Amino acid sequence: MWDQMLLGIQTAFTLQNMLFAGLGCFIGTIIGMLPGLGPMSVVAIMIPVSIQIGDPSTTLILLAGVYYGAIFGGSTSSILINAPGEAAVVATSFDGYPMARKGQAGKALTIAAISSFSGGTIGAIFLMGFAPALASFAILFWSAEYFALMLVGLSAVAAFAGKGKVLKALMMTLLGLMLSTVGESSLFNAPRFTLGLLDLQSGIHFVTLAMGLFAVPEAFFLALDVLRGKKGGSQEAREISNLRINFKEAKTIAPVIGRQSIQGFLIGVMPGAGATIASFLGYAVERNLAKPEERKEFGQGSIKGLSAPETANNAASTGSFVPLLTLGIPGSGTTAILLGALIALNLQPGPLLMQDRPEVFWSVIFSMYFGNIILLILNLPLVPYIARLLAIPRTYLIPFVLFFAMAGAYIGQNNATELLLLIGFGVFAIIMRFADYPLPPLLIGFVLGQLFEDNFGRAIRNANGIQFLWERPMTLALVIATLAFVLVPLYRDWRSRRKRPSLG
Amino acid sequence: MLSINRWVALGLLAFSSGYGYLAFTYRILPFERFLAMKPNTLPIGLAVAGMICSIALLLMPEGQDSASGEEKTVLGSDHKYLESPGDYEWGKGVALLVLAVVYALSLRQAGFLLSTSMFLIIGGIMLGERKYWILVPVSCFASFLVWYLVDEVLTIFMRPLPMIFYQ
């Protein structure tokens, strides 16, 4: 095994492979910033180019770099303009964007870069140490446990159920779940709720909904309120000194990074879970672990709330290589595309890969350390310049935000109906914000909805009823955790309401 | 006059009821009848929960929700725009949304380059930009750059020119 690892180190740290790892990270980061081009599309786009290289190790190293570069790039647009172009970075915008609005864009980007780096690096260490053992553990997870995991993920909405908002947050989650049932589903035979519209046949696209809910209202409110931009990010974003994090902040996020690297990695290992669920779950868990006064900051610009999903999604994307490399099972859309690339390169991923082609297996893992360092070196010096994007005059910023949001939904679809739908969601989101409804729960419901129904359906079919909820110990434990996450804030809300009249 | 909260709750109730109606009347295929979970099982549950939730929101006494000023977020509530509408430029906000709709409808006929440049230029002018010698080249360059990146570099097709050139 040590010989094989040494062979991997030798392969990974050749000049060519290091250059390609850096190139992959760079391309991924730049393209990942564009809404609508998530890791899956970026990796897919890069396949024809990378296969030309011929060497399987180099190809995989380049594609892996593109993959985590794109996840990191996506978080930039989430933080700066509230435009999460990919489901895995939605949770990043919950606290990243409020931080940018408070004039801490530089700091937010720095925290995102450090968290991503730590998540990715710790994930790579786990990948090296436990890959084979974890692969066999991951397949013990059945649809019942996945369903319970979705429930824990959905409990992240509790973060937006501040005083008096519990019902509103719940309603928004239900609405998100309803929207996720539109179109075709893997469980059933015919599309549902399409109202006869062909454009809805494949369901509502994530980018359309995310841009409509987040970016369009932001552009609208910026146009409406001349002062909004000024008291928000633009003025303070020029203060580059604000990008450093101090010792106290580093101490605050260190345990979050530690926990979320492990949790994110373990979730990434499970086929079908991936970076999106890891980020929501990371957010939910950290919020519940936080002290009451810290908890209030979640959703308002909490550094813990930003660090948790950023660490978790990068650790999970590293984790998703475990089933791919050791079992040949792609755990997510992106790793499915990588599997295609491996097969095209005449490699058979699976238990034998480690024995037959150890240099490929280990070099990919070692290149991850290098790739993550590159990502950090690449991004930290760029932070002040990227943060300055917010200082662009509003006469340019507003149309460009709107344009980027719409381009995200238009790219690859060439469908104007998609854009009309996006603006429709935007108008809906504006009305909901006037009425103080939290919008992130809707997106959480939507993203997890499809997986929620699929796994629930499969679990019910396997068990022929809902007894799996209490018969499988792991499912039961996860369900109880969810109930606690949801009921505790509800109880607090009820108690504070009872107290209020007596105060008046 | 109903407050915005009541109107929204009413709208959500109408949506949940409509969704529930569609779920309830959904035509289940013969072989799906015996499934433990039918295509409309979850939707019916969601519709019922949505209706209960929206009725509760509708009946909730005014003042129990954050919009009425009980709890303000760090960044401030967006409800403030309705409290003093005179302080804000509503015309610009609405015009921007209308422009976005026109942009969406023009993309097919006018092609990506022309419609995007026009969208950015008109958007800028609407918001008060008067330095046309900067606005026009920046907008045209930005739309060309995005098109070039997406169509030429990433090879994702986006029709650049107006429809007339393809007939």
Image: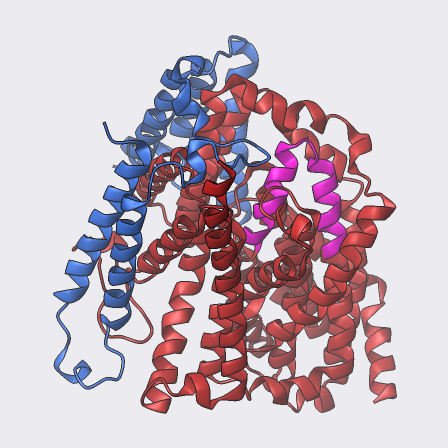
Chain colours: A red, B blue
Closer-to-camera residue (A105/A42): A105
Task: Judge whether residue A404 is colored magenta.
Answer: no
Magenta span: A89-115
Q: Tell me if I can see residue A167 in this picture.
A: yes
In the foreground, A278 or A161:
A161
Q: Residue at x 65, y 78 (%)?
A: A322
> How many labels, in total?
0
Q: Quadrant of residue A344?
A: bottom right
Residue A314 left/right relative to A117: left
Figure check: A326 above or below A230: below
Give the percent coordinates (x, y) of residue A127: 73, 76
The picture places residue A408, in percent across and down from the top left corner, at 46, 44
Instruction: Kindly identify the residue that appears in the image at 50 percent across and 53 percent down.
Output: A495
Give left or right: position of A395 versus B96: right
Q: In this rendering, would A198 be left or right of A68?
A: left
Identify the residue at horizontal 24%, vertical 43% (top origin).
B11
Q: Quadrant of residue B66?
A: top left
* Left or right: where A409 falls relative to B32: right
